[in-house]
Image: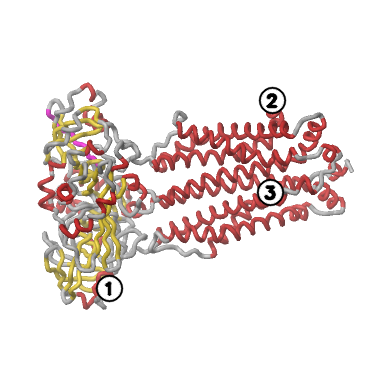
Amino acid sequence: MMYKTSLRNLWKNKSHTLINVLGLSLGITCSIVLFLLIRFWLSFDTFHSKGDRIYRLVRETIYQGNTDHTPGSQVPVPDALRTDFPELEEVVFMSYLMEGLVTVYTEEGQPQNFQETEGLVYADRNFFKVFDRPLLQGDPDQVLNAPNQVVIDEELAEKYFGKDWQEQAIVGKVISLNKDTELKITGIAEAKPENTDFPFTMMISYATVEKEKEEEGGWNSISSDDQVYVLLPEDLKVESIEARLPDFVEKYEEVMEGQQVHLSLQPLSEMHFDTRYATYSFNTIPRYVIISLGAVALFMLLIACINFVNLATAIATKRAKEVGIRKALGSSRAQLARIFMTEAGLITLFSLLVALGAAELLLIRMNDYLEMELQLNLGDPYLLLFLLLTLLSVSLLAGSYPTWVLTRFEPTQVLKSSMNTKMTKGFNLRRGLVVFQFVIAQAFIIGTLVLISQTQYIQNADLGFKHKGVVSVAVPGEDKQVKKTLKQELLRLPSVEKVTLAFSSPSSGSVSVTSFTIDGNPDTYHTQLKYVDKDYIDVYALKLLAGTGLSEVDTMSRLVVNESFLSKVGIVSPEEAIGRQVSIGGKMLPIVGVVKDFHTVSLRQEIGPAVLVDLDNYRKADILLSSSSLSQSIQEIEARWKDVYPEYTFDYQFIDEEIAGFYEGEQKMTTILGIAAMIVIFIGCLGLYGLVTYMAEQKAKEVSVRKVLGASVASIVRLFSVEFIRLIVIAFAVAAPIAYFLMNAWLQNFEYKTKLGIGLFAGGILITLLIALLTIGYRSMQAARINPAQALRND
């Protein structure tokens, strides 16, 4: 009976019910999606059964006021750890190869080539003893024990051997890596989970390259691709190991004077959230982002509840007589409370059902945008618990206050139509709730404007080199002459102006750092090192301040440095640097040129010393195109590239896209925050609509009297608007300093950043005022056009 009554009341007030369901469903939809996103991030590598005992060895180096962090370790470290820390249960070394050309042979012996761009790693034999990566075929204790063994995952198995791979005897087959290394398949692993920082599809026994790695790298060579993980025994405290690491450094490493090296053990559970150290997934999320999104989800629910309260109390006067009659007929306050709380629960339930459908649709677009596979799995107990808690908490938060307001009406007063100020004294509370809504809304808007401003600043910043119209293609393999042949072939194309061979572009996520000394200065310094050919300066239009460029040689013979290099070593003018001898890479080389500073990494970091060196360690060909058709130019480049590398897969990237990739996270966060801001504003306006409706009910007779006395519609609209403009201004006064504090803290992640000017904050309040005035104007005009006779007929 109670449910029938509640449903009848909801149907009777259809517009009120629809607005409430719309507001709540929007808030719940956002909270569901954000819950799934946060839970996905928090789930990274939590499935390892020994995860609480797995640690990564990481390094912090402090020198000359600079602090560097790396997850990389020297090649000799694993054996040294096993010797000096015998109590460690396991020590695992991994070297991430990432990409390579894989050749698979058919039954007829015909080769098939597959260009893999990620997921290839050299792993120690004890990898499967530490990390949970189930094998579908093969013995985990044996699969990586000997050189030239490889484990592939089930996705690669299907890719290489077809959908019926399970019916074939794959284990024991031989594949080839980069045309020079034969690998015997010893196991098939389950497909990698999405929520892991070990995104390996092919695990090659480290013994395959162990000798080569030991010859190339000693205690003075560190790569972030080479990482060490340890498994602690259950009864061993991590502090007991870390306390001995300083002695470990002192024993094996030659630390420069004034340099501090700190090794520590990073818990596996912290890897995904520590942005100081990269992971093999190249994906870390700082915890403040997770906390911020959690706060956004909470605020979404809160403002949806506030909207419910404002709308429910707005029609309180309409339901006052219903309450009076029910009380007069013997209904207790508790019985009435159950009716109104049931209504709130039903509205929340309807909203939740709508939200589930909306979230499913939203995830389709969001997964593509964020490159994820989030799923709304109603069999997930955590999701079900979240939905249940949301249903209960929203029902209580949204329904409690309106229920209290409605059930306290006195029958004698409401039946005589004598509702007085005492009955409606909660108006100030509702004002406060609207202010709270618009504090959140304006903070979101200002934050979005700051993100947009920083994005535009990044897009328009002078990077110190030409990057528009430059396309980059890979030059695989080690044959230097083949790479130079490709360059000459590309230069024959009419659409190609210039070509350079290089290890990386001017601004790159791939950075090589080395130490050096300069004649006349006893100090040791660090600099970025870029391996390039003689045309690099011309292709990227680097500004030569003094001297000449590089030459066409096969070994390092000369250096071109940037202005920051000179500042670091105390050289005043570019001309003074020409001819100075630099000890770098085991050689004494002259500085032959100085270029103007250019950004070698993202704008998050300050420009540091950089050296261009003529060493043919090339990984890419960067091509400056003319203004002709880009699509035709790419086709011509691909044809020439295929002539030189027929067995590889052609791939290209514009340098603009590579640079934009540095800020992909900010771009996506801008979009997400912008959408959230629009939703918050929309829900806030629904609440504002409710408060205006409430005022219109209370001021119905006043408005009628004013109209009878000649007041215009515009003056009555102004009567309503002034009140709410004041509330929005108050909200802005609270939101502005909050937004300034939060966004200023975020901008500290960038060495080069936009200014938090007054225009951003003015834009925030103007946008809010415009949207709010449209809402207020619409509802107040409705009130102003009511026939005065309808409101005054009972008096």
Out of 522 and 397, give the one closest to the viewer: 397
Look at the numbered disc 1 and give the secondary structure of its residue: helix
- Image-quadrant location for residue 656: bottom left
The alpha-carbon separation of the residues under discs 2 and 3 comes to 30 Å
- The residue positioned 63% from the left and 55% from the top of the image is 769
Q: Is residue 511 left or right of residue 463?
A: left
The alpha-carbon separation of the residues under discs 3 and 1 comes to 61 Å
- The residue positioned 20% from the left and 62% from the top of the image is 514
The three-letter code of the residue at mark 2 reads Lys
Label 1 packing within 10 angstroms: few (<14), some (14-19), many (20+) = few
- The residue positioned 10% from the left and 46% from the top of the image is 211
Give the residues drawn in magenta, as a range: 109-117
The three-letter code of the residue at mark 3 reads Arg
Callout 3–callout 1 Cβ contact below 8 Å: no
Q: Position of residue 776 (x, y in %)?
A: 69, 50
Q: Position of residue 454 (x, y in %)?
A: 44, 59
Out of 789 and 301, give the one closest to the viewer: 301
Q: Position of residue 17 (x, y in %)?
A: 66, 35
Report the residue marked by disc 2. Answer: 4
State which quarter of the image contains the N terminus: top right
Report the residue marked by disc 3. Answer: 430
- The residue positioned 31% from the left and 61% from the top of the image is 466
Query: Disc 3 or disc 1, which is closer to the eye?
Result: 3
Q: Earlier in the sequence, mark 3 or mark 1?
A: 3
Look at the numbered disc 3 and give the secondary structure of its residue: helix
Q: Is residue 754 above or below residue 176?
A: below
